[in-house]
Amino acid sequence: MKYLAITLSVVLILSGCAKRETVTHEPTGEENILFEEITEDTTNIGDITFTEVEKEPTEEETSIFEEKEPEVETTTPEKRQGYRVQIKAFKNETSAQKEAERARNFLMRDVYVEYIAPHYKLRVGNFLHRSDAEHYRIQVINKGYKGAFIVETTIVVQ
């Protein structure tokens, strides 16, 4: 049985390497090609040269999973003279920072902790005009910061 399998394998291998020719039937009105044999050796790949061409990937070739840097327009804030509303002052920086965080969440505005010896002062907002600061001071007083007042200082203008 082993000899039969080995013999059959050798026959199949040799028949795969044989030269092939096209065989057709005599014309009967229709041309039927039963099979096409290849007569030249196609196993020699020594003459093939591969070259790599570098090119920029197009939009379609770029992976959708590739992270791209978002295009962000960076503008530096301008500092000018203006007004803020001071809501509290503390001798301790930790207490001032805790209250500043609470005020940011409660007032939904920029809150600044400014150290002017010997106190840490909580100031809210960036107002170019005193009338805007006065209007906001009234809102802050209505929200519970009864001692709020307006200070002239350097502000950040976006």
Image (tube, rainbow, N blue to C red):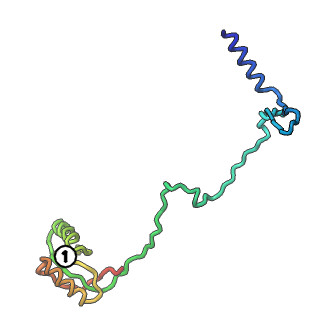
Residue furthest right in the image: 26
- Spot occupied by residue 92 in the image (x, y as percentages of width and height): 15, 68
Q: Amino acid at mark 1?
A: Lys
The residue that mark 1 highlights is: 121
Q: Is residue 57 above or below residue 89?
A: above
- Residue 28: which quarter of the image? top right
Identify the secondary structure beneath mark 1. Answer: strand
Residue depicted at x 40% and y 76%:
76
108 above or below 6? below
Q: Is residue 144 left or right of residue 36?
A: left
Percent of width and height locating residue 104? 23, 71
Viewer-proximal residue among 93 and 14: 14
Q: Judge by depth and name the residue closer to the eye, 15 or 104.
A: 15
Is 86 situated above or below 27?
Answer: below
Q: Residues within 10 Å of mark 1 (few under 14, many from 20)?
A: many
Q: How many marks?
A: 1
Report the residue that reaches farthest toward the front.
29
- Quadrant of the drawing holding the N terminus: top right
**Left or right, residue 105 beside residue 19:** left
At 16% across and 78% down in the image, what residue appears?
Answer: 87
Residue 97 image point, x, y percent:
20, 67
The residue depicted at 74 percent of the width and 22 percent of the height is 13
Q: Which image quarter is the C terminus in?
A: bottom left
Q: Residue at x 70, y 11 (%)?
A: 4
Which corner quadrant of the image does residue 107 belong to?
Answer: bottom left
Q: Is residue 10 left or right of residue 143?
A: right
Picture quadrant where residue 3 is located: top right
Image: 62 above or below 101: above
Which of the two residues, 146 or 65, is positioned nearer the viewer here? 65
